[in-house]
Image: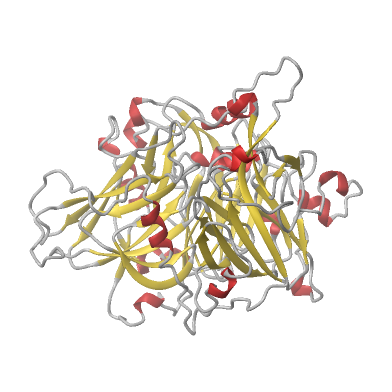
Amino acid sequence: MGGVVAESPAMVLRFLQLGVFLVFAVAAVSQATQGSRVHHYDFLVSPSTLLLCLWQCFWLCRQKSVLTVNGQFPGPIIRARRGDVLVVNVRNHGDKNITIHWHGVDQPRNPWSDGPEYITQCPIQPGATFVYRVILSKEEGTLWWHAHTGFDRATVHGAVVILPNHGAAFPFLQTHPHVEVEEIQPIILGEWWRNDDANVLLEESMRTGRDVKPSDATTINGEPGDMFPCSKSGTFTARVEGGKTYLLRVINAGLTNDMFFAVAGHRLTVVATDARYTKPFATDHLMVASGQTVDALLHANLTAGDGVRRRRRRYYMAARTFSSNTIVAVFNNSTATAILEYAGDDAPSSTTSPVFPTTTLPAVDDIAAAMAYTARLRSLASVEHPVDVPANADERLLVTMAVNLIPCGGGANATCTGPHGDRLAASLNNVSFVNPSGVDILSAYYHHHHHRRSVYGDDFPDEPASRFNFTDPGLPAEGLGPFTERGTRVKVVEYGAAVEVVFQDTAVLGTESHPMHLHGYSFYVVGRGIGNFDDGRDPAGYNLVDPPYQNTVAVPKGGWAAIRFRATNPGVWFMHCHFDRHVVWGMDTVFIVKDGKDPEAKMMRPPKNMPKC
């Protein structure tokens, strides 16, 4: 693993090689950040053939070469404190273009280091280098970084752990100052394709117009677990001691799926989501949408809930796909496992097979369990971590989301194998977004490019062209048609404006939950519901007191979700569904937030080494 992350102790690296993470106290893991507030990292992006003896990459009995950072999968863990700056030197030694996005980092006034290709930068070409300056501000908790090119984030991703400032405590410990919380290595949920390169599958989908082949397995820290052949010895194991409390940092890095997560025999207490603290609540399971993170406490009780001393030493941590649209022909219905193992003199003696969370891990299509979980999320709303929810909105958008079709195209000899012989696409307000190629949108905007109007249009619609029963299952039969228009259309807002966006799912080609992510901002999820949003009724039920503060919202299947934020971060910011095939198909748009009047309300100047297209 190369010791490339200077902040990681060598002992941790050795345990990672063995598939086991030794648990360290929070004070121990944060020692390396007690010096400079600027942390330097080197990321070497290159193909790696992961070996059985090191990272157990014969998953599903298939060895393969994948794109990695520093030869690690998942990639290096970044650790910092609130308000620190990360300087990350990315060297592309691969054979394709790459960019890195710092998911959930607001990057105040600094869209130049945000990362999405052709939105805020041209990609880093093979053999080239780019230095990202990642500015942390109010984030505190767990975020992550990942590639933002094609399907590269399938293997190019890693955790970002942001600790409180020196002298500040985790708010969930303020009422228990003598309780020591220890950390388990971040738990990254992902997906694995056995025989295929995910980018090859994407290229095939774009060529043929059909859907992307589903992944073959769900993974936890790169392994599907010991229920799959060839993964048993590499299954991730976290060792705990009875009587102690542990902080779990759970990240859904999956390309195409939301995930359920549960630990057999243990309840979890959710304390944060998307690096923002929540009112703590106990739960048997988590629902982590693609792109989201959750911080949760686990108490390693030596006695189970009935007061009887535990007889088992080992318990499964399990992750399962949450699929809101199971009528599709094929989807990943696998369950990944890792192991929670009690250690120490007081540990139970039995070493039999781990217990599985049979009664607490929801079924793959349990929409009620997913919605019940998300309904419990509330901001902490304390003196130290206040809320600032806009009471009114200056800009209101109703944004419909749909999977659509576009004509096959390509001339008389073209053959498409999507529905009805056409191509699958996706859209927001029936606009299927198209990435520019010769220049990125941020550069065209900032430099007042004389061909700017050929790069993008500033006429993204504030609402759909027509209102109808968006969630009617019989919608396709009504003759409204599934086709969408292609274009690079953005929304421009004034600095300081209070913005409301209502995301509305549609039944154009079937209803489905969509994880919508906004770069450059966290936002308040002030409302959600099933059916069509009613602007005369539903705003009266908004939570303007303590709504969850997130960067990715799970819009319910056949329903809607409303978010609000203040446009005080000038720049060019991507907004998209976090299912990557939907991104490529066009379920995206861009917010351009104008500069304010004061110097601190204006975008920073671009660095001199921006990549060239």
Q: Residue at x 74, y 49 (%)?
A: 610
In what quadrant of the picture does the N terminus appear? Answer: top left
In what quadrant of the picture does the C terminus appear? Answer: top right
Residue 420 screen position, x and y as percent: 61, 26
Report the front residue among 509 and 76.
Answer: 509
Q: Residue at x 60, y 35 (%)?
A: 93
Indicate whether 41 appears above or below 529: above
Report the front residue among 438 and 330.
Answer: 330
Indicate whether 597 appears above or below 553: below
- Residue 139 relative to residue 479: left or right: left
Total numbered badges shown on the rendered structure: 0
Q: Quadrant of residue 493?
A: bottom right
Q: Residue at x 23, y 59 (%)?
A: 240
Residue 246 screen position, x and y as percent: 29, 64
- Residue 453 relative to residue 125: left or right: right
- Residue 400 relative to residue 494: left or right: left
Does residue 52 appear in the picture of this structure?
A: yes
Indicate whether 602 appears above or below 457: below
Q: Quadrant of residue 342?
A: bottom left
Residue 379 screen position, x and y as percent: 47, 73
Indicate whether 343 appears above or below 386: above
Report the front residue among 480 and 547.
Answer: 480
Q: Residue at the far front: name it.
A: 478
Residue 184 screen position, x and y as percent: 33, 58
Q: Residue at the far top: name it.
A: 413
Q: How is the image coloured?
A: secondary structure
